[in-house]
Amino acid sequence: MVTLGKRKVLFRFSLWLLVGVGVWIQLHFYPQLPAKVAIHFNALGEADGWATRAAFVRFNLGILFGMAALFEVMIVYLPKLPVSAVNLPWREYWLRPEHRDVAMAYLMRYLLWLGNLTLLFLVGLSYLITLTNVYRTYRLGTVFWILFFLYIAAIAILTIELLVRFWRPPRRFGDV
C-alpha cells in the first residue's frame, strides 16, 4: 500500500480546508452581491459575461467541490492503476513491484501539491470575482495576473521536478 503518512493527511486536509474557505467566501458575500453578477472577463479584465447571483455561487461551489473530489479520486485510484495506464519515462522500471511504491508515493505527492495549488488558485479567483461584483467595479486588476502567473510558475516547477525525477534512466536498467 502506497502511503505518504502524515504529509498525505495534511495535504488532503488542506485540500478540503481550501474548499471550506471558498464556501465561507461565497456565503459571507452572498447578501452583498448584486442580483446580476459578472462571471466572465475578457483578456483586458473587463466583465463580458453575466449570471444570477445564485447561479454564480452554485457554479463556484460546484467547481470547488468537483475539483477537490477529482483529486481525492485520483489519489485513491492511482496506486490501483495497471502499469499500462501510467505514462512515465522508464515505466517498466519504475512500476516494477520493488520500485512501484516509491514511484506511486512520488506521483501522489505531485497530485496532492497540484490539487492544493489548483484549489488555492480557484479560491483566490473566486474571491477576486466576488469582490469585483460586491464593489461593482466589474474589472479584474493586476492581482488576477499575479495570481495566474504564480499558479502557472508553481505548476511548471512541480512538473519539471516530476520530469527530472523520472526522466533519468535508472543506473541498473539493463536487467529489466
Image (cartoon, grey):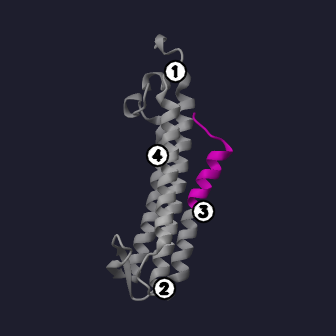
Residues at circles 2 and 1 in contact by the CB criterion of under 8 Å:
no
The percent position of residue 21, horizontal first and vertical second, equals: 58, 69
Q: Main secondary structure of the magenta part?
A: helix
Which residue is under mark 4? 74
For the residue carrying disc 3, how many other residues have a C-alpha within 10 Å: few (<14), some (14-19), or many (20+)? Answer: some
The residue carrying mark 2 is: 134
Q: Earlier in the sequence, mark 4 or mark 2?
A: 4
Amino acid type at circle 3 is Leu
Nearer to us of marks 4 and 2 is 2
**What's the amino acid at mark 2?**
Val
Residue bearing mark 3: 17
Q: Residues within 10 Å of mark 4 (few under 14, many from 20)?
A: some
Query: In the picture provided, is 62 more to the left or to the right than 11?
Result: left
- Give the residue drawn at x 53%, y 56%: 117
> Who's the residue at 53% across and 32% down the image?
165
Q: CA distance from mark 2 to mark 1?
A: 55 Å
Mark 3 or mark 1: which is in front?
1
Instruction: Say which label, 1 or 4, has the lower sequence index.
Output: 4
Which residue carries the number 1 mark? 170
Q: Is residue 14 magenta?
A: yes
Above or below: residue 124 compared with residue 79 = below
- Mark 4–mark 3 Cα distance, whole angstroms, equals 18 Å
Residues at discs 3 and 2 in contact (Cβ within 8 Å) = no
In the picture shown, does residue 53 fall above or below 44? below
Image: 111 above or below 27: above
The region drawn magenta spans: 1-16
